[in-house]
Amino acid sequence: MKKIIVLAVACLLLASTAFAEEAKEVARATFATGIENREPVESITEYVLVSGGTIFFFAELKNMQGTKASHVWSKNGEEVHAINFNVGGPRWRTNSSMKAEQFKAGDKVQVEVMGDDGKVYKTMMLNIL
């Protein structure tokens, strides 16, 4: 009887560890003025249009290794660009960007971080001024 209880507890511990390892998430996400060494330079929630400017989006993914993910950019509710990429490790930093000329003052920009399972893991908004 004691062996059965020990075995049951061990199975429960293994199951909970496996679940924790598989919890996919976006640990960090932000719009930024640039990316250096795979990190955002300056996080922003609004962007003032600048000729020749670029808007960057950064995301750090956890426990999504071996899958594909995407950054889906939308302007005023309409998809305008999607960037697909392979996730190569348990902590994966990625970024995408769009030229500022794609937008005009008053636009609402949204980026969704989407997994290959179709789930939206994070949604971020940016106001264009």
Image (spheres, rainbow, N blue to C red):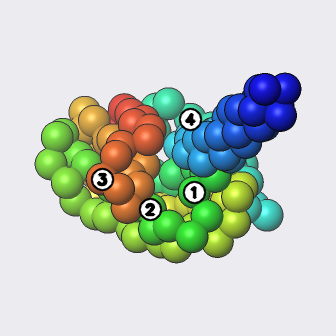
**Residue appearing at x 42%, y 49% in the figure:** 113
Q: Cα distance, mark 4 to mark 1?
A: 26 Å
In the rendered view of the protein, which quadrant contains the N terminus? top right
Which one is closest to the eye, mark 4 or mark 3?
3
Q: Are marks 2 and 1 in contact (CB under 8 Å)?
A: yes
Q: Nearer the viewer, residue 41 or 26?
A: 26
Q: Which mark is residue 44?
A: 4
Q: Cα distance, mark 2 to mark 1?
A: 8 Å
Q: Nearer the viewer, residue 23 or 80?
A: 23
Q: Cα distance, mark 2 to mark 4?
A: 23 Å
Residue linked to disc 2: 69
- In the displayed structure, would residue 66 be above or below residue 106? below
Q: Cα distance, mark 2 to mark 3?
A: 9 Å
Q: Where does the image place residue 53, in percent across and percent down from the top left?
A: 48, 58
Mark 4 or mark 3, earlier in chain: 4
Instruction: Give the amino acid type for the residue marked by disc 2 in the picture.
Output: Ala
In the rendered view of the protein, which quadrant contains the C terminus? top left
Residue linked to disc 1: 64
Whether residue 26 is visible: no
Residue linked to disc 3: 118
